[in-house]
Image: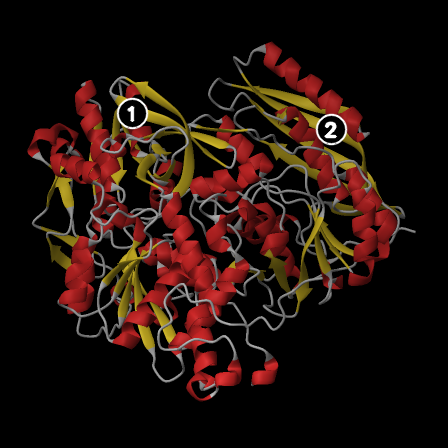
Amino acid sequence: MRFVDEFREPELISKTAEEIRRLAGTERHYRMMEVCGGHTHAIYRFGLKDILPENIELIHGPGCPVCVLPMGRIDDGLSIAKDPNVIFAAFGDMMRVPGTLGSPLEHKARGMDVRIVYSPSDALKLARLNPDRHVMFFAIGFETTAPSTALTIKRAKGEGIHNFSVFCNHVTIIPAIRAILDSPDMRLDAFIGPGHVSTVIGCRPYEWIAQDARKPIAVSGFEPLDMLQSVVMLLQQLKKGEAKVENQYKRVVPWEGNRAALKVMAEVFQLRPYFEWRGLGFISQSALRLRDEYAEFDAEQRFNVPGIRVTDPKAAQCGEVLKGVLKPHQCKLFGRECTPERPVGALMVSSEGSCAAYFNYEHRKTPLTQLSVA
Amino acid sequence: MCLAIPGKIVELMSSGDQDCAMVEVVGVRRKIDVGLLSEDKPVPGDWVLIHVGFAMSKISEADATDQMNTLRALGEVEGAMQEVQGYGLDHDPDHGSGGDPNDAPSEYTPPPITKAIQ
Amino acid sequence: MSAPITTGVKPQAIRFRDPQIEMAHGAGGKASRRLVEGLFAPLLYGNSPGPLGDAGIVDLGGTHIAITTDSFVVKPLTFPGGSIGELAINGTVNDLAVSGAKAEALVVTYVLEAGLPSSVLEAEVRAMAKAAQAAGVRICGGDTKVVEHGKADQMYISTTGIGRLLHGVVIDPASVRPGDKILLSGPIGDHGITILLARGELDMEADLRSDTRSVLSMVEALVGAAGPGVRWMRDPTRGGAGTSLNELARDCGLGIVLQEEKIPVRDAVRGACELLGLDPLHIANEGQFLAVVAAEYADAAMNALSLVPGGEGAQIIGEVREQPAGAVLIATSYGGSRIIDMLVGDPLPRIC
C-alpha cells in the first residue's frame, strides 16, 4: 500500500528506534502525551512501546471522541430513535457504547432500527432511500470528521431533504489540550499532535502550547515511522531546550489547514457555550452545534430530548485515565467489572480508548525472548 | 477520530452539485466525496487522504520522499560526527580524508572509518 | 489405525447470564463461546468428555464416526465465488475434515421463506449438488420447512454430515507442545470481505471472491505426510483465524506467537480492511484451515500442501510457546508485538 508500507519499513523502524535510544539516553525520564485516540490505537497496533526505551513514557490523551461522550448524550440519541419512524444511523465505533438502557446494538436487538454507516453521506443516502422515515445521524468526532458532517448537512439543505437530522456531538481538540495542561496532576514534557485533525485546522492552533506552555509539539502521522520520527523531533527539541510546533506529517498536513473544510464548518456549525466531556467535566467553547439556519437538521431542535445528565459510577476512574493521570490497569474496575465485553466506561468500548487498547493488546503480554520463527 | 487512508484518484465524477471521485486502494475501489478539496481540486492520478468517505487533503509525494530521506539519514550525521570527533582529527593529519568535524552540513558524507584507526 | 479421541482439556466453567440473545451470540466470538459453553454444553453435553471441537466423535460398536452440523445464514445469497448452497456443503465437509474425518454423507434442512422465487431455490440446489460432487460426498436425505414471508432471509440451510476418521491422526489440543508450528492453508479474509462488499451498502468494490471450497484434499495430504505430527486443526469461519487461535490457546493453555509478515492476506482484503478499520484476523473464511504440526513434521507438511491444487498459498505463520499462556501474540518484524484477542461480537468497522 502506497504511502503506508514505506512508513512501516522494518529496517528503518529499527534504525529510528535506535536513534531514539541514543537521543533519550538514560538519565532523563520523558513524558510525552499523544492526544489523539488514533495514535493510542497505532501505538498498540504496531507494538511501538516494545521498541521505545523505558525512559520514554507515552501517555494517552483525551482525543477519543467516543470516550469523552457522556452517557446521557447516548441516552438522548437513542430516545429519539424510540419512535419507530426514526432510523438511528451511526458509525461502527458507537454501536457497542453503553447507554443507561443498553448500547445501540442492544437496542437494535430489541427492535430499534439501528444502522451502521461508514460516512455521513451514507446516512443522507438512507434518508433519500426512505422518504417516509426519518433518518437521524448520531454524529461524533473531532475536527477531522466535523467538516464531512457539515458538508452533508449543507447538501441535505441544498437538495431540500426534510427527513434527515443530525444529533451533533462534534467536539474540538484545543480545549481538551488546554484542560490537560491546566490540570494540576499533569506533568508533561511534550505533545505528539493529532495529525488528521490538523489536516483541517492546520498547525497554527497549537502555537500557544509551544509559546505559552513552553512544550514542544510535533504534529504526527499514524504510521510507525511517523510516530517514531515525531518522538525523535521532540527529543531533539527537548535536548536543546526548545519549544516549537513542528509538522512531522508534512506530506498530508498543510500548515494553514484546509480552508474549504474550515469554511463549511463555520457555515453550518457554531460553538456551544459549554459541553460536558465525560471524565473532564464541563468545558466552555469545546463543542459544536448546528447554526439556526440549519435548525431543521438539528435533531436536538426537531425532537424532544430528555437531556438528563448521567454521572459515571464513582468507582470508574475514566476521567483520570483520560487525562493520563492513571494508566488503564490502575483503575479499580479494569479487567474486573469493566472489560470490553461488559464495559462500564467508554474507554473500554472504543477501539481507540486506552483501556480497550491496553486490555486487548497489552496486558497479557510477556516480553518476547526470541522473535524469529523458522 | 483518525482513521484515514491514502488512496489514488482514478476517476472524477459529478452527480448534481456533489463532487465525487473513485479512488483506489490496492485494488479496492471506493466512491468518495471530494467536496472538502474544492479549493484545490484533485485530478486523476493524485493521491488523497480519505476519512469517512471524504477526501481530506492531497498527499504530497515530494514531502513523503523528503521524509523517507530524512529518516534514512537519521543518526548518520550525528553518529559519523561522534566517530570523527573521537579520532581527534585536529591532531592527527595522517587520518585521511576527514574534514573539520565542526562544520558538517547536512550533505556531509562521512569518510569511511576503518577499524585500524580505532 | 484409527485412535479414539482422548479426553482433552475441559473448558473452564462459564455461566451464561446474558438477559437476551444478541447478534453477537452468533458471531463466533466471545459471546458465542459464552452461549455454547455456558448454556448448551452444561445442559446438553453434560456427560461428554473432551473439548468442544468442530465435530463430535461417536463410537458405534468400535467404529468411530465423526458427526457435525452447521447452519448457513448469509445475505446476499449469492456473491462472487459462490452462494449459500456451496457454503452449506463445504462448511460441513470442512468441519469434518479439520476433525480428522472424511465426509461420507450429508443431510440437509431448508427453511424457506414464503415468496422465495423457485428459480432462486433451484439455483441453490444445483449449486449444492455440484459442490457435493466436487467434495465427494453423498446427500442422502433432508427436511424442508416453509415460514411466513419476513421470517427467514429468503432461505436458511442447515447441513449435518457424518464421516469416518482418517487414519493416523488424533486431534487433541492437549497434545500441543511448545515448539509446534502453526500452519495456515492460504490467504485470510477473502470470504468475509467479499460478503461485506456484496451487500452493496458501501460504495466499494474489489476484485475479490469468496474462498469457499472443500479443504479435505489438503487435509488428507497433510495427514498423509505428517499425520503423527498433526496435533490440532480448525477451519476459521466466523470470528476469523484470530478467534480460532484464541480457542486453541485457551484449550491447550499455551501461547501462540504469530509473525505478522508471514500471514498471507490478499492486497484487496488488506485495502478493504484498512479502509474500514477491520482486522483480517477477525474476518470469516470458508475455504481455509489452521493446523498445529510438530516441528519435525513441518517441512513434510508444507511440501505435501504445496503439491495439492489450492495448497500453494500455505504458510507457516507462527509457533506455540509457553508464553503468553492462553493468549495469542502477533509480532512485527521490527520487534513490536500486540495481543490478538477473540472477537467480542461481529467485527465492527471504525472511523477512529
**Residue A336 in view (yes/no):** yes
Residue C219, image x, y percentages: 79, 44
In the image, is C258 to the left or to the right of A83?
A: right
Q: Residue at x 73, y 66 (%)?
A: C177
Where disc 1 sits, the SS reads strand
In the image, is C183 to the left or to the right of C147?
A: right
Label 1: few (<14), some (14–19) or many (≥20) C-alpha neighbours in 10 Å:
some
Q: A265 or A131: which is nearer to us?
A: A265
Residue A311, image x, y percentages: 20, 58
What label does residue C33 carry, if any?
A: none
According to the image, label 2 marks what residue?
A: C107
Q: Chain of mark 1?
A: B
* Callout 1 amino acid: Asp
Above or below, C291 against C255 in this view is above
Label 2: few (<14), some (14–19) or many (≥20) C-alpha neighbours in 10 Å:
some
* Callout 2 amino acid: Val
According to the image, label 1 marks what residue?
A: B19
Q: Residue at x 39, y 77 (%)?
A: B100
